[in-house]
Image (cartoon, helix red, strand yellow):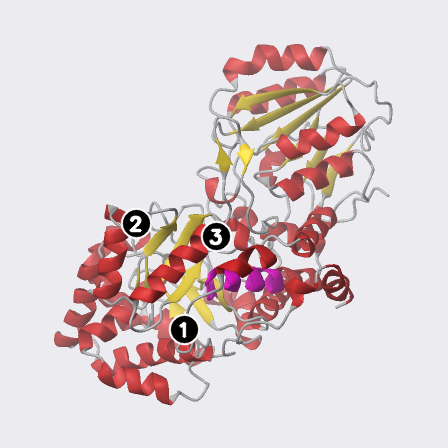
Amino acid sequence: MKLRLLLCAAASLSCATAPARPPQSSAAAPVSRWADSVLATMTLREKAAQMVWPTVLGDYTPLDSPQWRRVAREITEDKVGGYTISVGSPTEIAAKLNAMQRLSKVPLLIGADLEFGAGFRARGGYFVPNAIDLGGAVLFPTQMALGAARDAQLAYEQGRVTAIEGRALGIHIAYAPILDVNSNAANPVINVRSYGEDPRLDGTLGAAFIRGLQEHGMLATGKHFPGHGDTSINSHLALPVVTASRARLDSLEFVPFRAAIAAGVGAIMSFHGVMPALDSTGVPGTLSHAVMTELLRDEMGFKGVIISDAMDMRGVLDQFGATEATKRAVAAGADVLIQPLDVRATIDAIVEGVTEKRYTEATIDLAVRRLLALKQQMGLQRNSMVALDSVRAVVGDSANFAVARTIADRSMVLVKDDLTQVPLPASPTARVVSITVARRADLAAGAAFNGELRRRFPGLRTIFVPADDIAGSLSRMNAAADSSDVTIVGSYVGQGWDVTTVGAPQPFVDFVARRSLGARKPVVVAFGNPYLLGQIPSAPAYLIAWSGVPVSQIAAARALLGEIPITATLPISIPPARLGSGIRRP
């Protein structure tokens, strides 16, 4: 609380009266007259449409563009109940959502993947070819950074800032936090998006984030129930299978979700994966009545909104196809189906499920009543739009950025420092080279990190190495390292959603291994996949920064320079480094 008071004092605008609070559990709250009256006017197809939420980009779209005509048709003709908003600048997202709300007779609920703050979706990107950062909402480090900091108050603050900025943009539901316990180091899709591998820590931080979010007007969504952490397959691309026993699930995967339900989480998102211990029929959790209704609702007592993961993912499509997957998801207990392949076909499939007696119209009514009650409790029946003039006063506020910087500073973990290379030499004349290994499209990689290092070392040399062509860059990498006193290797491989494989390219592994045997040994900084150490165990110095966002890059540089203390510990195990280990530096 002390941190919040300091931040409020620094920028009172961002701590002003919060928007209307969402319900702690939307179905548990008394259903409003407005919700019942609207429900009574709807046809079965209109009710089905309330459960279908397409995805729309937050980009600029002229009124006569095919993209905008599609959105207008979905709202005015298909009468969808909500949307998932994706990437765009803050002002364009707010203006676009306002225009969409004007078109809709019943106000829309807007959800977004705000796992790492509103900036995870609402940033202007980079203007090319100059690589000018166009700014935007606050972008936090990944969740695993909070796991390293082990501070529930900081998790609450991240939720608070996310809610304030997100609601200013017209977003009502954050598809966050991720409650998956990342117990599998080979997980290609969760990884640093999780708080870590300790289920109790994950539950504590997740519950704090949920309270921060929901006490400031935005609904939280715990995901991906019943747990996506112990997988080595990306559910976007194929169907994962988790073979853990029910006893293991109870003691590990379910722990954060139970903590979230106890904290009053308003929504939970499903997992497109099979857990035979819960349903022996081999269907993914999203499509399983045993998982979504019998376990989540009946056994665990969850009364809020159940949101499917994206319905265009192979985890549900490969087995059944879009139409059958839709009917099974509704029969399983889903209230909302996000990102369908075809909006009209999905609405038709929900209606067909009633006529085929797969479920009753009363099932649809219950789901839609939850959604309408949520809209009423968000105050959307009175005003569904946001004030565009207020966006710049709230979104990206300096006090909000201060929370992100604090989390980044508190999250640095020094796993190895065999030769006491950290902090770096104090002499500004030291010959230092910073090698950045990242995707070609990652325009931010290394920029803030090298800028911060250059304050100490004006003669800093920098090399950008494309992750898909490390072999072609080896000669200049070695030449630069040979002529330097200090070699820093920053790896941005495997960042967040970019994780397609957890392994680093072999030429990278070979380069670090060879340099570690030489006289000038490298300092490796993991901005991407933290498990990289398992491939380069000979690296004498290994710092984990958890993400390549600017605040994490700056924190990593300051930690190496000895300007901030290094106090965090591992929220995961990277053998031989154990969970909870970490070298402290004052």
| Mark 2 residue crowding within 10 angstroms, few (<14) / some (14–19) / many (20+) | some
Q: Position of residue 251 (x, y in %)?
A: 56, 66
Task: From the viewer's perspective, tell me whether residue 285 is left or right of residue 266.
Answer: left
Question: Which residue of the protein is positioned furthest toward the front in this rendering?
Answer: 389
Q: Where is residue 186 in the image (x, y as percent from the top left)?
A: 50, 43
Q: Quadrant of residue 536?
A: top right
Name which of mark 2 and mark 1 comes first in the sequence: 1
- SS category of the residue bearing label 1: strand
State the mark number for residue 372.
none
State the mark number for residue 305.
1
Q: Where is residue 408 in the image (x, y as percent from the top left)?
A: 69, 47
Question: What is the total number of numbered labels drawn onto the structure image?
Answer: 3
Q: Report the front residue among 158 and 33.
A: 33
Q: Nearer the viewer, mark 2 or mark 1?
A: 1
Do the CB atoms of the residues marked 2 and 1 lie less than 8 Å apart? no
Distance from the alpha carbon under mark 1 to that under mark 3: 29 Å
Considering only vertical position in the picture, is 361 above or below 101? below
Distance from the alpha carbon under mark 2 to that under mark 1: 23 Å
* Residue position marked by numbered label 3 in the rendering: 91
Task: From the viewer's perspective, tell me whether residue 577 is left or right of residue 127.
Answer: right
* Residue position marked by numbered label 2 in the rendering: 314
The amino acid at mark 1 is Val
Q: Report the front residue among 280 and 479.
A: 479
Q: Residue at x 64, y 50 (%)?
A: 145
Quadrant in the picture for the C terminus? top right
Query: Is 179 one of the magenta-colored residues?
Result: yes
Q: In which quarter of the image is residue 371?
A: bottom left
| Part of the protein shown in magenta | 159-183
Name which of mark 2 and mark 3 comes first in the sequence: 3
Distance from the alpha carbon under mark 2 to that under mark 3: 33 Å
